[in-house]
Image: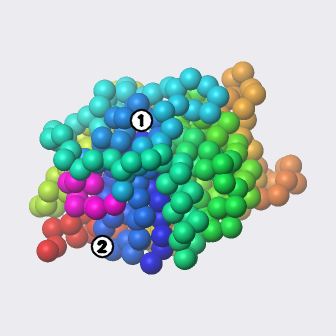
Amino acid sequence: MRNVILDCDPGHDDAISIIIGASKRSGLNILGITTVAGNVEVEKNTRNALQVCELIGLDVPVVEGAVRPLVRESEIAPEIHGETGLDGPVLEAPRKEKSSGHAVDFIIEQVKKSEGKVTLVPTGPLTNIALALIKEPSIKDNIDEIVLMGGGTFGNWTPAAEFNIYVDAEAAKVVYESGVPVTMFGLDVTHQVIADEAIINRVAEIDNITAGFVKELLIFFAETYRNHFGFSGGPIHDACTTMYLIDPDMFNFEDVNVTIETKGEATYGMTVVDLLKTTGKTENVKFATGVDEETFWNVFLDILDSYGET
Ligand code: BDR
Ligand code: CA
């Protein structure tokens, strides 16, 4: 079983990513969930993670992390995820409590003590991951891959920058330059998995509590993406990470060099993806370029269906 830590800011698509990763089919050993300031304040992201865990019966530590980015002030995205960060479904306050300690120390401890290597799966700003790599660089030897959602060859927060990278580009720079293999799901691929009305209708046909919850998430997410970007539905960006861990073959990749822009006036937070190898710089990223959409949605729906099995 592959050991993973899900580092996230739930977030509709983060929540869906957790649900996929926690399914029986995933074959993943989730060591814990760590939260970071991103879509909304970290306290809200933590509460949302606890609610998701409770709903699906996932009994793993949920550990709160960085309250703000390394250098800049926080930026949040309530216009996409609502005031709670997980608007849409009506959920009761979680009974499950967060674990004590800080996410950065949790990541370090878990990676150090794990017998097998650990895969880090960040789906929010990269603050916690960067801090862990800075605080204890030796953990690099026991991380096999960082599978992240972020960046792309275009932006959604600015014309050049995607939200997760923009919020903490300094942290992203640390992670991308760490030498740990990075597998990157940017907007180029995540915009290929848009949960439009047809997908939501297929989810609605699945009769279990988890699928019902996902349906409510997707309805809200589709609405904000329609209003904000004119899309036909919400791209379930973060879910690409756990879907990849289940079935990597449905995605296409290019090995490339990616540099993080931290200085540009109009390009802060850009992931400069050298697809045509113009720089001659070492390839540091496995960059997702495409996905077999039919397979993606079939696997996704099968996973939701599996939550009805006893
Ligand atoms: C990313 O930003 C967040 O709003 C989503 O959860 C996703 O991680 C997409 O740009
Ligand atoms: Ca996210």
Q: Which residue is mark 2?
A: 24
Q: Residue at x 38, y 71 (%)?
A: 26
| Crowding near the residue tagged with mark 2, few <14, some 14–19, many ≥20 C-alpha atoms within 10 Å | few
Q: Residue at x 33, y 64 (%)?
A: 22
Check if residue 165 falls in the magenta segment.
no
**How far across and down, in percent of the image, does residue 112 sit?**
58, 65
Q: Residue at x 63, y 68 (%)?
A: 142
Q: Is residue 105 above or below residue 27?
A: above
Give the extent of the magenta segment.
Answer: 52-60
Q: Which residue is mark 1?
A: 42
**How far across and down, in percent of the image, does residue 40 sit?**
40, 31
Camera-near label (1 vs 2) is 1
Q: CA distance from mark 1 to mark 2?
A: 28 Å
Q: Which mark identifies residue 76?
A: none
Q: Is residue 281 visible in the rendered structure shown here? A: yes
Residue type highlighted by circle 1: Val
Identify the image quadrant of the N terminus: bottom left
Check if residue 54 falls in the magenta segment.
yes
